[in-house]
Image (tube, helix red, strand yellow):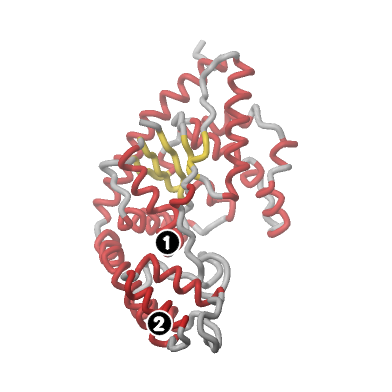
């Protein structure tokens, strides 16, 4: 059984794109792999969140992922800051990470351009902390998006460099977990692109039915087909794509045929889509409400996950210290 590690930034507010993208695959992975899912609160400190926001986001993220189906009986779920061994490995790996290679990281250069007033050391060494998250558990696979591929390659470099410097075969070089054709991309409601947190085009799992209806009714469409069998515009195809994952097949086919014969009524399409989204998300929404009121259970999940993660991490740090020659006199 391969070990898989994946970090979740504590921003909360999962949307349909997150769910049908990574989450559906996480639910499959936890049945067949030794999975460790962590809430990356230390990573998020690079943006200087307020203590209140950070704590609230950590809790909300845990609630949303549990409500979506991550099972603490099948996977290890923990908060990054609850495993202090990660900080230690991060510090040790930093000794073999070079400023030049960190400066060339695409994401670092992007962050500098976007926010030149907050170019902190955490941003520069972000890839090293990510490497520590992965290597501390000797993960074989890491699910990563396109924007994280360079960071994973740097993790492989750090692992290889450690082994070469200390003449050991200790860290394995993890591979990307490629979801391939299984990865469903959910578009936004604005007529183009993918659904996102900051674009204002998403349906969130925490949205109540009233808000979902309001958002869907505002979704971008077009002026309507005027010639039978016209090509479907991107905006309308986006709604069909969402309908494909939340609606009954015959309902999707009905509206596709309506578009083809120029009889489609976008108001009816949106009303149907909104109700289908509500029907799909309601069990998750209800479970989120239940979990939010059960602080004892949330604490138990986080504590159990931290204990298991620390069991692995403490062994790794002990062995790394010995390899590097850090021993008691």
The image shows residue 42 at horizontal and vertical percentages of: 51, 46
Q: Nearer the viewer, residue 329 or 83?
A: 83
Secondary structure under the numbered disc 1 in the rendered image: loop
Which dot, 1 or 2, sits closer to the camera?
Answer: 2
Q: Quadrant of residue 79?
A: top left
Q: Which residue is mark 2?
A: 269
Q: Image check: 301 left or right of 38? A: left
Q: Is residue 173 above or below residue 29?
A: above
Farthest residue, direction top: 329
State the residue position of label 1.
14
Image quadrant of residue 282? Answer: bottom left
Where 118 sits versus 131, above or below?
Answer: below
Among numbered discs 1 and 2, the one appearing first in the sequence:
1
Using the numbered discs, state the Cα–Cα distance from disc 1 to disc 2 in whole angstroms.
24 Å
Q: Are marks 1 and 2 in contact (CB under 8 Å)?
A: no
- Picture quarter containing residue 76? top left
- Crowd rating for badge 1 (residues with CA inside 10 Å; few <14, some 14–19, many 20+): many
């Amino acid at each position: 059984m391969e070990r898989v590690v994946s970090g979740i930034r504590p921003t909360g507010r999962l949307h349909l794109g997150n769910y049908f993208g990574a989450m559906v695959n996480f639910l499959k992975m936890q049945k067949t792999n030794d999975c460790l899912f962590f809430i990356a609160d230390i990573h998020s400190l690079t943006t200087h969140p307020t203590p209140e926001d950070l704590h609230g986001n950590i809790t909300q993220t845990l609630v949303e992922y549990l409500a979506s189906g991550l099972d603490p009986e099948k996977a290890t779920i923990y908060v990054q800051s609850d495993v202090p061994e990660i900080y230690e490995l991060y510090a040790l790996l930093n000794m073999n990470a070079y400023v030049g290679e960190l400066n060339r990281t695409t994401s670092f250069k992007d962050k500098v351009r976007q926010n030149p007033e907050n170019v902190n050391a955490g941003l520069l060494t972000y890839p090293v902390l990510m490497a520590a998250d992965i290597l501390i558990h000797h993960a074989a696979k890491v699910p990563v998006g396109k924007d994280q591929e360079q960071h994973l390659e740097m993790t492989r470099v750090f692992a290889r460099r450690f082994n070469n410097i200390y003449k050991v075969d200790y860290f394995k070089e993890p591979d990307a977990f490629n979801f391939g054709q299984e990865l469903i991309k959910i578009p936004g409601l604005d007529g183009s692109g993918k659904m996102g947190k900051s674009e204002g085009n998403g349906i969130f799992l925490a949205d109540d039915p009233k808000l979902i209806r309001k958002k869907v009714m505002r979704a971008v469409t077009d002026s309507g087909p005027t010639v039978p069998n016209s090509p479907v515009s991107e905006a309308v195809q986006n709604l069909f794509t969402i309908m494909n994952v939340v609606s009954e097949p015959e309902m999707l086919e009905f509206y596709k045929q309506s578009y083809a014969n120029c009889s489609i009524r976008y108001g009816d399409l949106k009303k149907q889509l909104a109700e289908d989204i509500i029907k799909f998300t309601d069990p998750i929404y209800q479970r989120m409400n239940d979990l939010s009121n059960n602080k004892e259970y949330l604490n138990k999940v986080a504590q159990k996950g931290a204990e298991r993660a620390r069991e692995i991490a403490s062994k790794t740090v002990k062995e790394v210290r010995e390899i590097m020659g850090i021993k008691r006199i």
